[in-house]
Amino acid sequence: MEHYNLDEDEVVLYKGDVVFKEKTQSTQIILTNKNLVFIDVVKKIFAHDEIETQIYPVNEIKMYEGVPQVKAKSNDVEIYLKTKELEFGFQSKNEVYKFRSAIIKLLTGKTGFERGADKVKDKIDVVNDTFGVDVVKSTEDVVKNGIVESIGGLFEKVGKIGKAMFGKKK
């Protein structure tokens, strides 16, 4: 890259352009496995262009309950670092999604989809443990056998409730 040299063990995860709220021109953004880099080329009329580079280690991004503090709203992104906040905008929501997904995957080791699936699994496990049922198996039974027979069978395990409510006979 022209204005930033990667370390030997550093790779680019995302590269694009953003606009900071206090600036009018675009800034190049590079997310690597080590750093978040912003590169500005400041045009000079009678002199050479000036390059301004800001580098923030990704381990400076605040985490809360295992989630990087990178907030997206429309085309804008806020990143909460340990020492400051960064606010900038992308050209499209799609670019916001790509950038945010890359940071989440980098800092958590999981995609947003995998994190969501883990949350659902955790909730199902709570229901299973609390009520002593297998939610996945019960749902499978409902699909195979219909709702009345499946729920009746579930309540039959509890006792006479299934018989009283659904008239289920053995």
Image (cartoon, rainbow, N blue to C red):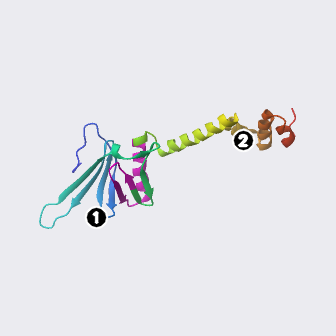
Image coords of residue 122 (percent x, y): 58, 39
The label nearer to you, 1 versus 2, is 1
Q: Which residues are magenta?
A: 78-106
Residue at position x 54%, y 40% from top? 118
Name the residue furthest front: 83
Using the numbered discs, state the Cα–Cα distance from disc 1 to disc 2 in whole angstroms.
Answer: 56 Å
Residue at position x 22%, y 59% from top? 41
In the picture, residue 39 is in which quadrant? bottom left
Image coords of residue 47 (percent x, y): 12, 63
Report how many numbered discs are placed on residues in the image: 2
Image coords of residue 147 (percent x, y): 77, 43
SS class, disc 1: loop
Contact flag, marks 1 and 2 (Cβ < 8 Å): no
The residue type indicated by label 1 comes to Gln
Q: Nearer the viewer, residue 126 or 139?
A: 126
In the rendered structure, find residue 156 and report the number of the disc placed on it: none
In the rendered structure, find residue 25 and report the number of the disc placed on it: 1
Q: Is residue 10 toward the left or the right of residue 72 in the image?
A: left
Residue at position x 62%, y 36% from top? 125
Instruction: Sort mark 1 into few (<14), some (14-19) or many (20+) by Cα contacts within 10 Å.
Output: few
Name the residue furthest left: 46
Q: Is residue 156 toward the left or the right of residue 30 in the image?
A: right
In the picture, residue 77 is in which quadrant? bottom left
Q: Within the magenta stretch, is there residue 61?
A: no
Judging by the rendered image, the residue that carries numbered circle 2 is 143
Image coords of residue 146 (percent x, y): 77, 42
SS class, disc 2: helix
Q: Nearer the viewer, residue 12 or 20?
A: 20
Q: Within the magenta stretch, is there residue 91?
A: yes
Instruction: Sort mark 2 into few (<14), some (14-19) or many (20+) by Cα contacts within 10 Å.
Output: few
Residue at position x 51%, y 45% from top? 113
The residue type indicated by label 2 comes to Val
